[in-house]
Image (cartoon, rainbow, N blue to C red):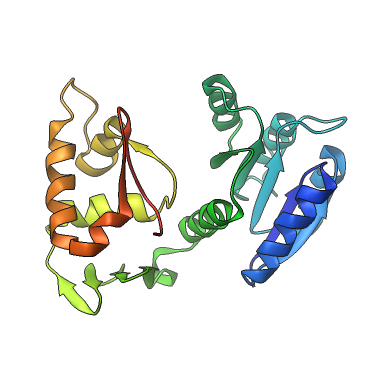
Amino acid sequence: MPTVLVIEDEKDLADLVAFHLEQEGYCCLVAHDGATGLAEARRCKPDLILLDLMLPGMMGTEVCRTLKGAELTAGIPVIMLTARGEEIDRVVGFEMGADDYVVKPFSTRELMLRVRAVLRRKLPASEVATISLGALLIDVERHLVRVAGEEVQLTSTEFKLLMNLAERIGRVQSRELLLQNVWGYSYLGDTRTVDTHMTRLRTKLGAAGELIKTVRGFGYKLEES
């Protein structure tokens, strides 16, 4: 059972998040300030930390920087929780080593999807057998995709594109980032190849193609219906 440490000074929110984590089958620990959370992370070495940015005494960015700078805790993934959604705050969080970023107010469903996705990425590939989203089933090891039990034939590029979204459920991926992660080259001023492949992928997935959402002017994300 994965252990998740919640470092959040708003007690009601921390209790709500802890409740939903436990409902999802996780073991949950809670700390209400940065110094206590840091000590708890060192003591129990959780599988994931949900870390508020604005904490009393010790800011979340400092907690994250300290965690990522120590060999004992560097490998623990961190999801930042904050009411501040400006791009500069996200950049700072990622520069400190955060693995994901969720802006308040957030739905607990979205947060649970982010938690699941980050923990899945932490697992060795051999332990991630399948990814299931409604009627969509992805067999990671065999590179097979099924929709409502029927196998869907995808090209290697289409499978990589789908996996890139599935491993980051609920998180928007820019066209430029998809070009880099799936095709292996940097943005050269033309992202139409991403849109073309995404259209083909949606068509092949049929009804499950609706799980892929377009974020106008930015990119795509995969989320449960």
In which quadrant is the N terminus drawn? bottom right
Task: Tell me where residue 150 appears, x and y as whole percent.
Answer: 18, 77
Q: Quadrant of residue 47?
A: bottom right
> Which residue is at 38% across, 69% downward?
132
Q: How many labels does the image show?
A: 0
Residue at horizontal 82 percent and vertical 31 percent from the top: 58
x and y, in percent, of residue 119 in the image:
53, 58
Residue sitting at x 32%, y 30%:
218
Task: Find residue 7 and report its horizontal and vertical position in percent.
Answer: 77, 46
Task: Judge whether residue 214 can be spotted in this image.
Answer: yes
The answer to whether 78 is drawn above or below residue 147 in the figure is above
Q: Position of residue 204 (x, y in %)?
A: 13, 60
Left or right of 200 on screen, residue 78: right
Can you say which quadrant of the picture contains the C terminus?
bottom left
Between 106 and 144, the one nearer to me in the picture = 106
Q: Quadrant of residue 191?
A: top left
131 sits to left or right of 79 = left
In depth, the one of 193 and 71 nearer the eye is 193
Q: Nearer the viewer, residue 5 or 110?
A: 110
37 lies left or right of 163? right
Q: Which residue is drawn at 16% across and 51% down?
A: 157
Looking at the image, can residue 42 be seen? no
